[in-house]
Image (tube, helix red, strand yellow):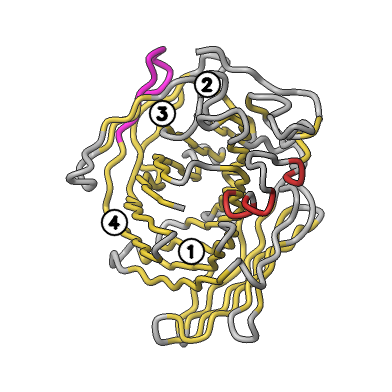
Amino acid sequence: MAQIELTHPTLLLKSDGTLTDVGWSRQPILDCNLEAAHFYSLRFLQRPRIKRWGYYAVTSPTYFFSVTLADLGYAGQAFIYLIDFTTGKYHEATLTLPFSRGITLPRNSTTGDSAFDNGKVRLAFHLTPDGRHLSVVWPNFAGKDLTADLTLRLAPDHESMTIVIPINNVRRFYYNRKINCLLAEGRVTWGADRFDFKPADTLGNLDWGRGIWDYRSFWVWASASGFQPDGRTVGLNLGFGFGDTSQATENALILNGRLHKFAQVDFQYSSQDFKRPWKMSSPDGRLDLEFTPFIERVAKTNLLLITSEVHQMFGRYRGTVIADDGKVLHIDGLIGWAEEHRAQW
């Protein structure tokens, strides 16, 4: 499986709506000119097929917090969830917004802010010179008012897993950037409860996506961000199930801010019992991991045009990964997640 690394900045789309390049990169170098998308002769039908989102998460040894803004074309969603690893309990809330009314999302992952404010619920993702600032106000979240104020640090040379691939059609595609191991600091306040996140033990993630997807879609995504015993940050991003990955997969190790690329990674897991251990391995022997879940988060949506079912498992990764320089990295107890997602959107 040949993996094509992109190194030269260019437009995402040509004037006819087809991809300029297909491949992966260590930094986002494509200008996301979605205005050039052209896959229906009647252009007003195109917007419902264009999907855009920004998903942030922070992981500490005891808590997980996530916030998302998504524009699915004919509807938008704002949602948050909070998980207590010690008790296994989680809470979440979602707002579905016709025609994505009130949601602002930027053209690219490197510039511009994301926001939503309906006078009650307020979400803002602000780019700063050294990272991102997340602000959330969500009244009556599971019975108590929630606020979040989080800063995610991103060094200019920190590498991320960025891919652009076609999806079953020359004018359907997925352009995605996933950033692991952002140093996270701040707090989530939920009623009288306060959850403090410190960069010594908390790391953040960003899943930034743009694309024209098939109406019926399926994918598996596995991710983790944590620390090695020697203090180095270590991230995993693995996945399959969407598009043509013959020239670029999203499989990578991110070690101390440097990306180490893998081609094919095979998953073994049970859709009948997601709580059973998952196996991830690469045919070339560079990756051999077992993921043991300890919490299952199930999220289902049924809004006629939009339906989805997510089984997001939180657990621990153990095994070995071989970096690009041939050195073996031992993973032992790294907290992360693995999920199966089926959607009609």
What kind of residue is marked 4?
Answer: Ile
Q: Which residues are magenta?
A: 281-290
- Residues at badges 3 and 2 in contact (C-beta under 8 Å)? no
**In the image shown, does 89 or 139 lie closer to the viewer?**
139
Which residue: 65% across, 56% down?
Answer: 152
Q: Position of residue 338 (x, y in %)?
A: 37, 44
The first of marks 1 and 4 along the sequence is: 1
Number of disc labels? 4
Mark 2 nearby-residue class (10 Å; few <14, some 14–19, many ≥20): many
Mark 4 nearby-residue class (10 Å; few <14, some 14–19, many ≥20): many
Q: CA distance from mark 3 to mark 2?
A: 11 Å
The residue where tag 4 is placed is 295
Q: Nearer the viewer, mark 3 or mark 1?
A: 1
- Residues at badges 3 and 1 in contact (C-beta under 8 Å)? no
**In the image shown, does 172 or 187 lie closer to the viewer?**
172
Q: CA distance from mark 1 to mark 4?
A: 14 Å
The residue where tag 3 is placed is 330
The first of marks 3 and 2 along the sequence is: 2
In screen coordinates, is 59 left or right of 137?
Answer: left
